[in-house]
Amino acid sequence: MAQIDREVAAPEHFGNDVIEIKQGEPIELDLRIESVMEGVLVSGSARATATGACVRCLDPVHEEVDVEFQELFAYADRAAHHQEVAGDDEDLQTLDGDLADLEPVLRDAVVPTLPFQPVCQPDCPGLCSECGARLADDPTHHHDVIDPRWSALAGLTDETENNEKRN
């Protein structure tokens, strides 16, 4: 058994469309590696900071990520035997010589924990749908909107006001 603390750079596209751990950003790994009968059991945790944009107001969002994971990396000969017995439908991680590729394991552990709709604060009011102004900056922001069904009548009031001014 060995315990390893390591910092690695995030790979490309490590997130979803709105929030991700940017490529090259550090991911802190605390690993426990154990030799077991079938292969090598890797347990640990990963910590990083994901960045993205608030889905309501488009301000930057920084989300701390802290996940735990565990994966068995089978010895190549054991993996071949297991696939013969169980069939090819099961995903089984295998060792490449003495190396274990943790990227797919980390991706499976981290990406589902990222918020699909990140917000800068829980009560973020977002942007005005009429002009795009940030509503958090001006809470009393509003527009006088005329119902499109009555917009033709608005032209009559303008004509009436012009006629009254002429008289």
Image: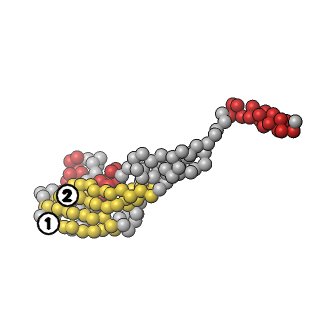
Q: Residue at x 74, y 34 (%)?
A: 154
Residue 135 percent coordinates (x, y): 52, 48
Q: Is residue 166 left or right of residue 125?
A: right
Q: Position of residue 31 (x, y in %)?
A: 20, 63
Judge whether residue 105 can be spotted in this image.
no
Give 166 or 2, whichever is nearer the viewer.
166
Task: Quickly name the residue at label 2.
Answer: 43
The colour mode here is: secondary structure
Location of residue 6 with respect to 161 vertically, above or below? below
**Up-down relation of residue 52 to residue 89 (above or below):** below
Residue indicated by mark 1 = 2
Name the image quarter holding the N terminus.
bottom left
The crowding category of the residue bearing disc 1, from other C-alpha atoms within 10 Å (few below 14, some 14 to 19, many at least 20), is: few
* 30 vs 128, nearest the viewer: 128
Tell me, for residue 22, which label it has, or none: none
| Residue 78 percent location from the top left of the image | 18, 57
